[in-house]
Amino acid sequence: MSGRALLMWDEAVTQYDFGPEHPMDPVRLALTMSLVRAFGLDRATDVVSAKPVGESTLRLVHREDYVSAVRAASADPRRADQAYGLGTVDDPAFAGMHEVSALIAGQSVGAAEAVWRGEAAHAVNFAGGLHHAMPGSASGFCIYNDASLAIARLLELGAERVAYVDVDVHHGDGVQAAFWEDPRVLTVSLHEHPRTLFPQTGWPEETGAAGPGEGGAVNVALPAGTGDAGWLRAFHAVVPELMADFRPQVLVTQHGADTHFEDPLAHLAVSLDAQRAVQEACHELAHEYAEGRWVALGGGGYAVVDVVPRSWTHLVGIAAHAPVEPESMTPSSWRDEVYARTRQLGPARMTDGRWPVGFREWAAGYDPADRLDQAVLATRKAAFPLRGLLP
């Protein structure tokens, strides 16, 4: 296996653009890649572009009629069919939407193929992680579910155990749905509680289809307001034990940056430093349990200047075994570009000033009056016994 990391990048992914009033501003991708370059991480990785996925690959996850509907809306946005979730407030139709969505999915599928074949130990596609798209509909700013397509391609190539860990603030509902009945895939999602956030799914009791799929879905529904210590406590109380039990051949992770306290669309209070800590933890889990095979994706994140570029640059650095130190200053050339593009001042450092982030390990004890501990215990009680683990 090559020790080099792949960074999947094609400038054309910035054409995934729902319009000037939409929160998913593609400038977040451009500014991330600029910051990656400013830190020289493009030289620490192999920057490559994969082809867009074709019809046969899309059909691994998505229904034929849905793909046809996306193609029609892509050719003429006025033909968008809202029955497929297209042309809505969340997912406005735009010219070329099929092509750029297939391109983003192609980067995730290409990353998965390269890691499985041993061409790279790790691969990052921060333009990916569009985890809400369903087999037959768009949802939550997501047209094609690149994460599901990457996992489906791994299964097609012969993988027998793929773990998917999603730390976006929103539940990874589309990926869970795609593999609800498949015991070869373990989906784990840590997200804000469905009572307070879209898509109103991801309850601890959602554990996979009865039969072979039972225990294949694990959901940690975090109380609104959860901060660094609670977020890390929940992650470490659930994810490592599941990975030790499942022993995935490949670890696929989704790193939506919208858990951050500055994010305008959600209600967690996580810092950049805690996000970096979870990225490091995922990297370590890949080496410990998956022979280093790690596919890391982006996801949500709507503080497009202050948070997303720094978070995903840390992700690229960790995957490249060239981590950016939290105390590092952001290069002045990058801050100049931020101002030129957005008329906003870019952040000066690669930290929120909370590094290193501390938390209390689950083994240290459980507080029955603590809402975070109640959430963790609900997950462990619902899902762990189905896998033969103690709650």
Image: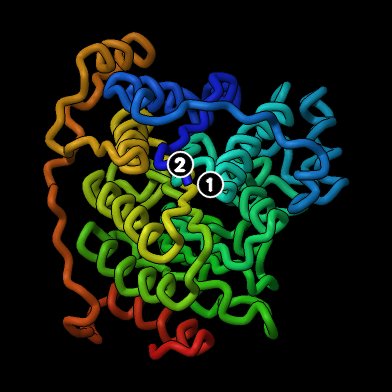
| Mark carried by residue 325 | none
Q: Where, by quadrant of the figure, is residue 331 drawn?
A: top left
Mark identifier at residue 2: 2
The x and y percentages for residue 372 are 29, 73
Sequence-first tag of 2 and 1 = 2
Distance from the alpha carbon under mark 2 to that under mark 1:
6 Å
| Image marks 2 and 1: residues in contact by CB distance under 8 Å | yes
- Could you say whether the residue bearing mark 2 is in a helix, strand or loop? loop
Looking at the image, which is closer to me, 361 or 72?
A: 361
User: Which residue is at a point 73% across and 21% down the rendered structure image?
Assistant: 95
Question: Considering the image in quadrants, where does the C terminus appear?
Answer: bottom left
Expressed as whole percent of the image width and height from the top left, the position of residue 250 reads 52, 58
Up/down of 388 relative to 260, above or below: below
From the viewer's perspective, is residue 18 above or below residue 2? Answer: above
User: In the displayed structure, does residue 161 sit left or right of residue 295?
Assistant: right
Q: Nearer the viewer, residue 129 or 302?
A: 129
> Residue 324 at x, y = what percent?
23, 35
Q: Which mark is residue 118?
A: 1
Q: Residue at x 87, y 46 (%)?
A: 65
Secondary-structure class at tag 1: loop
| Point 42% across, 48% down: residue | 255
Is 260 in front, or is 4? 4
Q: Amino acid at mark 1?
A: Gly
Q: Sort mark 1 into few (<14), some (14-19) or many (20+) by Cα contacts within 10 Å.
A: few
Q: Position of residue 252 (x, y in %)?
A: 50, 54
